[in-house]
Amino acid sequence: MKVSEYIKLGGYELLTKSDYGDREIDGCYTGDLLSWVMGRAEEDNVWITVMSNINIVAVASLSGAACIVLAEGVSPDEGVIKKADAQDIIVLRSDKTAYELCADYFKFTNNDKL
Amino acid sequence: MLKHYNIDGQDFSIAGEASSDFKRRLKKLGISPDVIRRVAIAMYEAEINTIIHGGGGECDAEVSNDKITVTFTDHGPGIKDIDLAMQEGYSTATEQIRELGFGAGMGLPNIKNYTDDMEIETEVGKGTVVRLIVKL
Ligand SMILES: Nc1ncnc2c1ncn2[C@@H]1O[C@H](COP(=O)(O)OP(=O)(O)O)[C@@H](O)[C@H]1O
Ligand SMILES: [Mg+2]
């Protein structure tokens, strides 16, 4: 699934300037502890989190996340979007809970990863 | 390739900058994605430790024929019990640091898991040197 399709299917809000719509997504991870995300998320995962400070950009970039999805409608701290744009990281937002966002992903991919 | 980075111990907002820069350079060199990913993860954890525990320091990163070696040096408090520090979940990070998402006590275990070799030299009150090696 491409990021552009994912955004459309979920009706998520795009916070960064471009969705790099052809970026491929492969799998999904949720968590707020940065070392867990670094150690356990896989390349090209959607990363769902309520953590909204500037450090999420480096974590997404270094772990190779396809995009960050901020759950529960949280607002990113100042500077997050600017840094994400500079590093070609896609940041989305939704009012849904992390659980609901995982369930969305499960539906969109017809359960092919679990 | 040899790169030297200063790691600012005060500014959390630029944490990961050295790791991000080195990752970009490895990509340009055409290093395999798996190796790049492992170096990036281990290096980020070591960089964060240098900042939040070591109070800042320095990093030397080198690509040679057969391996990538990254060394972080700080003059912070040192590690009293390395075996304990290596345990998953052990952390002395403050509440304030934890609120940022750090301090899960998974940094050193992540470094160990993602590298071929890691060395820690530390002395209480003097500082810590963490060296990580990923084979090419
Ligand atoms: N450079 C360092 N200087 C001093 N103490 C360190 C350093 N790196 C790690 N430590 C100690 O080892 C513990 C475990 O480190 P780590 O596994 O990265 O977990 P975390 O950083 O989440 O606390 C730290 O909480 C700290 O007590
Ligand atoms: Mg750590």
Image (cartoon, coloured by chain):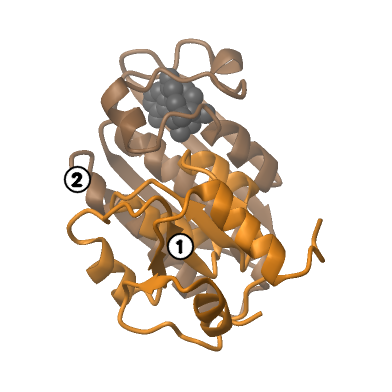
Q: Residues within 10 Å of mark 2 (few under 14, many from 20)?
A: few
Between B68 and B46, the one nearer to me in the picture = B46
Is ligand 1 within 8 Å of the beta carbon of the residue shown at mark 1? Answer: no
- Residue B68 visible? The answer is no
Query: Are tags 1 and 2 found on a single chain?
Result: no
Instruction: Name the quadrant containing residue A105.
Output: bottom right
Q: Position of residue B90 (x, y in %)?
A: 53, 18
Is residue A99 depicted above or below A103 in this figure? Answer: above
Please give the name of the residue rendered at 59% of the width and 40% of the height, measured from the top-left corner: B111
Is residue A109 depicted above or below A102 in this figure? Answer: below
Q: Colour of chain A?
A: orange
Chain bearing tag 1 is A
Please give the name of the residue rendered at 45% of the width and 62% of the height, measured from the top-left corner: A68
Q: Colour of chain B?
A: brown
User: Of the residues tagged 1 and 2, which is closer to the observer?
Assistant: 1
Between B35 and B101, the one nearer to me in the picture = B101
Instruction: Name the quadrant containing residue A19.
Output: bottom left
Is residue B100 depicted above or below A11 in this figure? Answer: above
Q: Residues within 10 Å of mark 1 (few under 14, many from 20)?
A: many
> Which amino acid, mark 1?
Ile
Q: Which mark is residue A113?
A: none
Residue that label 2 marks: B11
Q: How far separated are the C-alphas under marks 1 and 2? A: 23 Å
Chain bearing tag 2 is B
